[in-house]
Image (cartoon, helix red, strand yellow):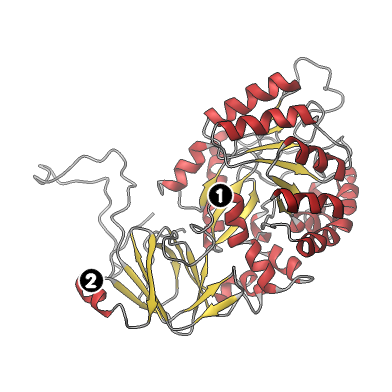
Amino acid sequence: MHFSDPAGKHRQPQTWVPWPPPKDYQLDSRPWRLPPHRPMIISGAELVDPEHGETVKGMDIRIEDGKIVEIAPCESLSGYRDQRNATVIDATGLYICPGLIDCHVHILAGLGTAEDEPGTEMENDLNTALGLKYMLSNGFTTVRDVGGATAKHRYSTESWLTPGPRLFVGGPVMSMTGGHGDHRSQFDMLSTNSPYGQFYNGGMEHTSTIADGVDECLRTARKLMAAGADHVKICTSGGVLSPYDKVEAAQYTVPEIRAVCETVKALGGTLTTSHCNSDLGARNAIEGGVGCIEHGGMLSRDTLQSMKEKGIHLVPTLIVQDAVVNGPLRPYVSKRSYEKAKTVASHSEITMKDAVEIGVNIGYGTDYVPMFQLAEFDLRAAFLPSKEVLKHATCNAAKILGMEGKLGCIKEGALADFLLLSANPIDNVKILNRPDKHLKAVVKDGRCVKSSVKGLPVEVELF
C-alpha cells in the first residue's frame, strides 16, 4: 500500500522514524493509518441519478472528510477552492456515478473441486484480501457478505488495513440439520465425528452453522449478533450447491424463523435475510418476519405481491446460475447441482420480470465469482431497461443495507463513494462490464484507489 500527496509523491512509510524522534512525534500503534482526507471538488462531470433515472449537467461536487458536503452549479464554489486549497478535478465529459453495491457475496469462498485440499488459514486470508481489491478495482465500493465474513473482515476494510469495499457482514449462515448450509456427506450424517457446521471446498470453511429448534435458533442468532453481525442469514429452502437437499424443499419452520427474526430486530440488526429458491420456503420466511429473500428463483406472483406489501427485498443472483449451466463453473459442480441450477435458471428471469412489474425492491447480487461479478449487469440488461438495472446496484441496494441516502447516490450528506465513467450507465448499463474501456476512476470514502483522470491522483494503490 502506498500513500501519495496531491503532487503524486509517495509519503514516507509510517513504520520508520528518525532517532531521536521529532519533538511533535506521536506513537501510532496502527502504521497503516491513512493521512487526513484532502478536500476535493469534482467539476464538470454529469451527475448520474439512478433513483430518478436521469443525469444532471453543470454541477460541482465538494467532498470533505469522506462525505459529499455540497453540490452546486459549476464555478459557484470558486471561493471555496481558494480558501481551502481543495484539489479540483476537471471531469468534463465524464459521468459521476454512485459506487456499485453487490448485496450477495461470499468473500471467503474459493473455487475448488471435491478433491482439493483445504487451504491454510493464511492462504485463505491472502486470497480474500486479493478478492476484495479486485472488487473495489472494478467499481464495487460496498458489498454485503451473506456467508462467513465477520466483524474482523469489516474492520480490515473499514480501517484500510486491507483496501476493499465497505463490508456489511453476517457471520456464518444458519442452517437446519440437512439444510442448505449442512455440507456433511449423507454417509457421515449420523456420525458424531463428522465436521459439523463446516464446509471445506477450495478454501471455504466455517461459512455455516447448524441450529435446530427454537431454543438453538435463539442462541445462535444471539451469538451472531454479539459477534458483530449487521444482519443474519438463514436457509429456508434447498440450494443449488448443497449436495443432497432438493432445491424446491422448504427448510426451517415458521417458529424457528420467527425466533431468529425477532432476535435480530431486538438486538439492532438491519434485518434477517433468507437463502430461498422455493415458493413454500419464501412464504414461511415471510410469515416468520424476514426482510429479504436471496436468489428467489421460483417465486410465484402471489408471493412477490406479499413481499411488495410487507416491504421485503429480493436479491436475485443470475450470473452464478448461468456460469454453472452455460459457463466455466460447470466442471466445479456435481451433476446433481448442475440439474438443480438448470431448474432455478429456467424460472429466474420470469420471477425477476414479475418482481419488477409488481414493484418489489430488487438488489444486485452475484454470489461472487470475482471474474464474473460485473457480468450480472449484462444478464439483467438482456430483459430489463438499463435504468432499472442500475437502481438494483445503487439506490435499491442501499435500502437493503439500511443506508438509503448515504450510499448508492450522489447527494449532499452521502458518503463519497463514486465512479467516474466515460459513458452513461442509465443509457446502457452494460458499460459497467467494460471497466477497461469506461471506468476512469474509483473513489471510496473520499479516497481515490484507481484513476486515469488528469489531476486525480491515486491515494491508495490496490496492486
**Residue 272, above or below 312:** above
Among the two numbered marks 2 and 1 on one chain, the one whose residue lies closer to the N terminus: 2
Q: Position of residue 202 (x, y in %)?
A: 69, 41
Apparent side of residue 103 relative to residue 137 in the rendered image (left or right): right
Q: Position of residue 348 (x, y in %)?
A: 83, 57
In the foreground, 142 or 291: 291
- Residue drawn 75% across and 27% down? 256
- Which quadrant is home to the N terminus? bottom left
Amino acid on which the number 2 mark rests in the picture? Asn
**Label 2: how many residues lie within 10 Å, few (<14), some (14-19) or many (20+)?**
few
Disc ID at residue 402: 1
Residue 206 visible to the viewer: no
Marks 2 and 1 sit apart, C-alpha to C-alpha, by: 35 Å
- Residue drawn 32% across and 52% down? 34
**Residue that protrudes farthest toward the front in the picture:** 309
Determine which quarter of the picture holds residue 82.
bottom left
Disc ID at residue 85: 2
